[in-house]
Image: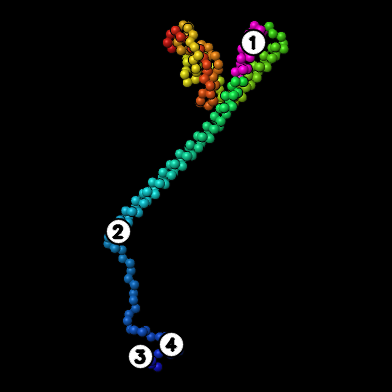
Amino acid sequence: MANSNGQKEPQDGAAPEAANDKEPVVSKPYVMPDDPDEGSVEALTKEVAEAKDRTLRTLAEMENLRKRTAKEVSDARTYGITAFARDVLDIADNLQRALDAVPAEAREAADAGLKSLIEGVEITEKSLLKALEKNGVQKLDPLGEKFNPNFHQAMYEVPDSSVPAGTVVQVVQGGYTIGDRVLRPALVAVSKGGAKS
């Protein structure tokens, strides 16, 4: 059966005929242009370089932060008791003064009760110094050493030609270190007039 345009109408179940007899359209494959856009490649290369630089800087900052934090933790362990240790040094000084107040002759002639008291003070001082050492606090004993301004504080000079000039000949007050820092310098008397060391 033909319609008003003169074309055949499809019968039931039959496929419709093509409206025109032209060939089907075939898509062409993508062909890369001969001259790709150089600007976009350079921009991407620059962006990659900047991203790499930012990443390396971030990694370096993180490593520095890790090292700095480890050092701060170590310092906190070593030097965290500094204020407490300074307060305890006064007690150690007072125990030493108590022992120095009793002359050697009086110790020998003392009765049993006084000898026990002196021994008790000596044991207490040794125990206190051991507890300080256990926590990183060391006592300085510079007698006979060359004067070192990093660890000693000169109180006065003593004319003594038997030892080289600049030698510690008397310790007025003991010094202490904590870790590798000076907790309190030793107060000392230094010789003068002897041969140069």
Mark 4 or mark 1, which is nearer the start of the sequence?
Answer: 4
In which quadrant will I find the C terminus? top left
In magenta, the rendered stretch is: 92-108
Q: Nearer the viewer, mark 2 or mark 4?
A: 2
Whole-angstrom CA distance, mark 2 to mark 4, is: 53 Å
Residue 188 drawn above or below residue 88 = above
In which quadrant will I find the N terminus? bottom left
Residue linked to disc 3: 5
| Label 2 crowd bin: few (<14), some (14–19), many (20+), radius 10 Å | few
Residue at the spot 30% in from the left edge and 59% down from the top edge: 37
Mark 3 or mark 4, which is nearer the start of the sequence?
Answer: 3
Residue linked to disc 2: 37
Mark 2 or mark 3, which is nearer the start of the sequence?
Answer: 3
Residue at the spot 35% in from the left edge and 90% down from the top edge: 5
Identify the image quadrant of residue 22.
Answer: bottom left
Residue 69 x, y percent position in the rendering? 50, 37
Q: Dots 1 and 4: beta carbons under 8 Å?
A: no
- Please state which amino acid type lies under the numbered disc 2: Asp
Whole-angstrom CA distance, mark 1 to mark 4, is: 132 Å
Whole-angstrom CA distance, mark 4 to mark 3, is: 19 Å
Residue 150 x, y percent position in the rendering? 47, 21
Q: Which mark is residue 102?
A: 1
Check if residue 101 falls in the magenta segment. Answer: yes
Q: Nearer the viewer, mark 4 or mark 3?
A: 3
| Label 1 crowd bin: few (<14), some (14–19), many (20+), radius 10 Å | few
Q: Is residue 130 visible?
A: no
For this view, does 110 lie left or right of residue 142? Answer: right
Q: Dots 2 and 4: beta carbons under 8 Å?
A: no
Overall secondary structure of the magenta section: helix
For this view, does 55 lie left or right of residue 178? Answer: left
Whole-angstrom CA distance, mark 2 to mark 1, is: 98 Å
